[in-house]
Image: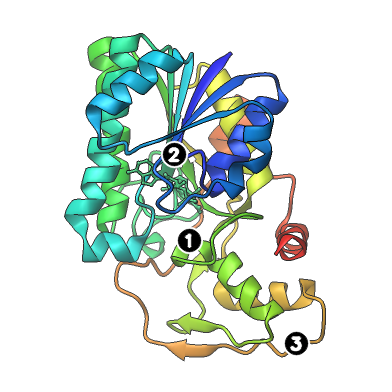
């Protein structure tokens, strides 16, 4: 099958591109290389993937690229992905994440693409988990605390609208905190990459807040299995892709320390909490389990060891 992956030079997109090629698909990647790199795609490019450099905000470019690639499926992962940047530059966040998504949906409609997958966020779309019965389910109330969470929610709503208006089949995967090799040690999403790099350099981590804030960590290989299963299925609407387990940042640091090479004392330095970041979150994978037969296969201990080994 022919596939188009936007954001394919990034962390998750490059792993997805590798997996699509491995099962025999033809892959075109669209990426502006703003946070992604050619290096992430080195083996994919050698294996036949095509990279077209460009911006999802350039509507004509996107329409031409989609028409040229004639994909059966669009995997839309290109995004502004940082909570802090979304607070500092909310209009930029909305333009990339909302208008960019609309450009891809329009191109899908015009070209007659059969299926559309959006990378959404289980970590930001529900808002503060303390007010919910965690783990959050897809039908939990959605009250994002930052523009990034809202722009992902708007993207999901556009998918639903395009199904109602044009019958475009789509699925939105609400990823928990994804981690693994190739993740950039930047931005709050990359906690494992940031802390892992500091650990290996023998430096101390900075924790924003008291470290008891919780996140739901899910390993990249499990995420890619979920993306393929959800897109191959006829599933419509949002689906959580996470472990359902809350792990505090302090527990994460302990886990990294234990998975690391030496008896590094990995004690954090504390800074004030960051606006827009939730105190607690975990997301329930029950829908993915029952409808896709998907479940987490790489636990945190194993995943941290694999990630550190790749750093
Ligand atoms: N990593 C996580 O934990 C996580 C969690 C929830 C959702 N997501 C979502 O998954 C997707 C991939 O995230 P990631 O962690 O791989 O991030 P990433 O930054 O590694 O990948 C994003 C890719 O999109 C590209 N890009 C950004 N703006 C673009 C634009 N205007 N035009 C074309 N390309 C553009 C970047 O160059 C990069 O290659 C994003 O949509 C993100 O919001 C990630």
Residue hosting label 2: 77
Using the rendered image of the protein, determine whether residue 107 is visible from the camera's viewpoint.
Answer: yes
Using the rendered image of the protein, determine whether residue 241 is visible from the camera's viewpoint.
Answer: no
Q: Who's the residue at 36% across and 14% down the image? A: 67
Residue hosting label 3: 264
Residue 120's image quarter? top left
**Cβ of mark 1 under 8 A from ligand 1:** yes
- Tell me the crowding category of disc 3: few under 14, some 14 to 19, or many 20 or more residues within 10 angstroms, Cα based: some
Q: Who's the residue at 23% across and 66% down the image? A: 88
Q: Who's the residue at 32% across and 39% down the image? A: 55
Look at the numbered discs 2 and 3 and tell me whether their residues touch, using CB distance below 8 Å. Answer: no
Q: Say which label, 2 or 1, has the lower sequence index.
A: 2
The numbered mark at residue 189 is: 1
**Mark 3, secondary structure of its residue:** loop
Residue nearest the viewer, comparing 286 with 234: 234
**Mark 1, secondary structure of its residue:** helix
Q: CA distance from mark 2 to mark 3?
A: 36 Å
């Amino acid at each position: 099958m022919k596939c188009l992956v936007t954001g394919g030079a990034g962390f998750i997109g490059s792993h997805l591109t590798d997996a699509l090629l491995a099962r025999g698909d033809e892959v075109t990647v669209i990426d502006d290389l703003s946070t992604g790199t050619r290096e992430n795609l080195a083996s994919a490019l050698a294996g036949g993937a095509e990279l077209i450099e460009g911006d999802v905000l350039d509507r004509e470019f996107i329409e031409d690229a989609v028409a040229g690639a004639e994909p059966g499926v669009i995997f839309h992962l290109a995004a502004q992905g940082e909570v802090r940047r979304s607070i500092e530059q909310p209009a930029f966040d909305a333009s990339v994440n909302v208008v960019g998504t609309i450009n891809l949906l329009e191109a899908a409609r015009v070209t007659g693409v059969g299926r559309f997958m959006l990378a959404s966020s289980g970590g930001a779309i529900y808002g503060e988990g303390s007010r919910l019965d965690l783990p959050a389910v897809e039908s939990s109330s959605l009250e994002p605390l930052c523009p990034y969470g809202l722009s992902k929610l708007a993207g999901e709503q556009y998918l639903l609208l395009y199904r109602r208006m044009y019958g475009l089949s789509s699925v939105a995967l609400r990823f928990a905190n994804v981690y693994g090799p190739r993740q950039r040690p930047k931005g709050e999403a990359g906690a494992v990459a940031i802390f892992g790099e500091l650990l290996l350099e023998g430096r101390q981590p900075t924790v924003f807040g008291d470290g008891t804030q919780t996140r739901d960590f899910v390993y990249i290989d499990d995420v890619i299995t979920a993306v393929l299963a959800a897109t191959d299925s006829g599933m419509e609407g949002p689906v959580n892709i996470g472990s359902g387990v809350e792990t505090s940042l302090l527990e994460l640091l302990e886990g990294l320390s234990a998975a690391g090479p030496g008896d590094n004392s990995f004690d954090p330095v504390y800074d004030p909490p960051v606006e827009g970041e939730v105190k607690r979150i975990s997301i329930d994978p029950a829908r993915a389990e029952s409808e896709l037969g998907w479940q987490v296969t790489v636990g945190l201990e194993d995943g941290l060891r694999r990630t550190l080994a790749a750093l």
